[in-house]
Amino acid sequence: MTDRIPIDAGQIDALLQARGWQRARLFEHDGIDPAALREAEAAGAAALPLACALADALGVAPSVLDAGSPAATRWHARRKTWLVFGLLALFLMTMAFGYRVGADLAARDNRAECIADGGIDCDTPRRTLSTR
């Protein structure tokens, strides 16, 4: 009898979703037969060659294919951490970009106001607060 590795259809779907793949993309890899995959998902366990081919196609260890395994739990925690840090980085970049655009617009408005007031040197920033 061949060795079987526990797999979870929901876990495979989560791994596909994390990569932005459709299920059909799995079948492009050697060793992954659609009928064998359906049968393994229904049984909750896959033969070792199929599990290894799935894991290789998805870029994970075979133990990650089972949603209840510690490896899968670590994978989900890492994914969540990367998602949180990615969103934080996106937020900070958006804030920096917004600040820069706002500063440029304020400088443009200040220059236009200086020209309208008849100013001579309108390209130097105006200082409104005293430093002394």
Image (spheres, rainbow, N blue to C red):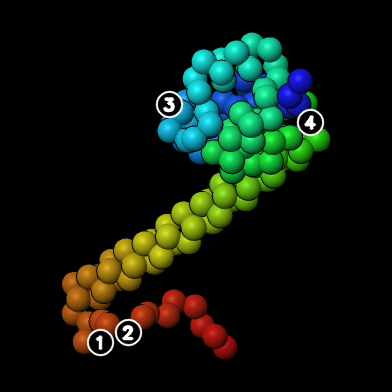
In the image, farthest residue toward the right: 70
Check contact, mark 4 vs mark 1: CB within 8 A.
Answer: no
Cα separation, mark 2 vs mark 1, equals 6 Å
Asked if the residue under mark 4 is in contact with the one under mark 2, i.e. CB atoms within 8 Å, the reply is no
Mark 3 — residue? Answer: 24
Residue for point 28% across, 66% down: 109
Q: Which residue is mark 2?
A: 124
Q: Position of residue 24 (x, y in %)?
A: 43, 26
Please indicate whether residue 71 sits to the left or right of residue 41 in the image: right
Q: Quadrant of residue 9?
A: top right
Q: CA distance from mark 3 to mark 1?
A: 65 Å
Q: Is residue 123 visible?
A: yes
Which residue is at the front of the view, 124 or 100?
A: 100
Q: Nearer the viewer, residue 11 or 28?
A: 28
The residue carrying mark 1 is: 121
Q: Dots 4 and 3: beta carbons under 8 Å?
A: no
Badge 4 marks a residue whose secondary structure is: loop
The reply to whether residue 67 is visible in this rendering is: no
Q: Nearer the viewer, mark 2 or mark 4?
A: 4
Is 95 situated above or below 20? below
Identified by mark 1, the residue type is: Asp
State the CA–CA distance, disc 2 to disc 3: 61 Å
